[in-house]
Image: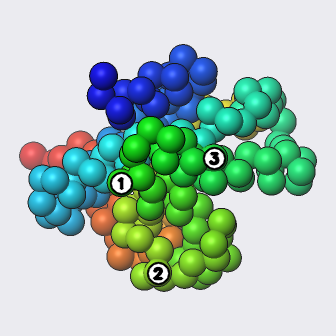
Amino acid sequence: MDPLRTLVEPLDANDPATAAHGRAVAYWCSLIAGQLRLDRDEHNWIVHSAQLHDVGKLCVPRDLLRAPRALRPAERALVAQHVIEGERLLADYGLLVYRDAVRNHHERFDGRGYPDGLRADRIPLVARIVAVADAYDAMTGQRPYRFPMTPDQALLEIERSRGTQFDPAVVEVMLAVVGSAIRPVAV
């Protein structure tokens, strides 16, 4: 069996919403990678990395993932461990090639992210790409504790976080690809 599927399938069974989110993030990452004109192998690697970015949530209690309210600080800290747990799962399945996205997608461009406090170009490019796509899908998706933002509201929030939370260059590409994906082309 394909090792990638051995992790994606349990994620789908355990938490379909997280799995669907992974597929959506992979979609946006594919568009970003295409805009960056990455070669086919790197493009595919980024897409697979994005699909697995939240695999560590297999180790997070489902009631926290589905909580109908904002999480308390201790609960947020437990959920934040999904990046470390995800890296451990990748190691267990011989898939450390996807480590950068799984471990580092919550790092921030200004260095105030987790788990390692990396900043700017010390954050692997794949993680900087996944971070923007992840945030966009999280903001526009339905959550038990809040209504989704419109695509324009989410893009405005991402733009506001350029240079602090997100890599400015990746934000530029995301604005272009989402804009072209959600707006019809005038003829």
Say whether disc 1 or disc 2 marks the residue closer to the N-terminus. Answer: 1
At label 1, the amino acid type is Val
- Counting from the top left corner in percent of width and height, residue 151 is at 47, 47
Left or right relative to 112: residue 165: left
Disc sitting over residue 43 in the figure: none
Q: What is the spatial separation of the Cα atoms under label 1 and label 2, in whole angstroms?
A: 17 Å
Residue 149 lies in quadrant = top right
Q: Quadrant of residue 181?
A: top left
Mark found first going from the N terminus, 3 or 2: 3
Q: Amino acid at mark 2?
A: Arg
Work out whether mark 3 precedes mark 1 in sequence or the reverse, and give the earlier one: 3
Q: Residues within 10 Å of mark 1 (few under 14, many from 20)?
A: few
- Give how far across and how far down residue 119 sits, in percent: 54, 81
Q: Is residue 163 left or right of residue 83?
A: left
Q: Which residue is mark 1?
A: 97
Viewport quadrant of the N terminus: top left
- Identify which residue is drawn at 65% across, 66% down: 115
Local crowd at mark 3 within 10 Å, few (<14), some, or many (≥20)? many
Local secondary structure at mark 1: helix
Please report contact status of discs 1 and 2: CB closer than 8 Å, yes or no: no
In terms of image quadrants, where is residue 176?
bottom left
Amino acid type of the residue that numbered disc 3 sits on in the rendered structure? Glu
Disc assigned to residue 122: 2
Residue that carries the numbered disc 3 in the rendered image: 85
Image: 123 above or below 129: below
Residue at image position (79%, 47%) is: 78
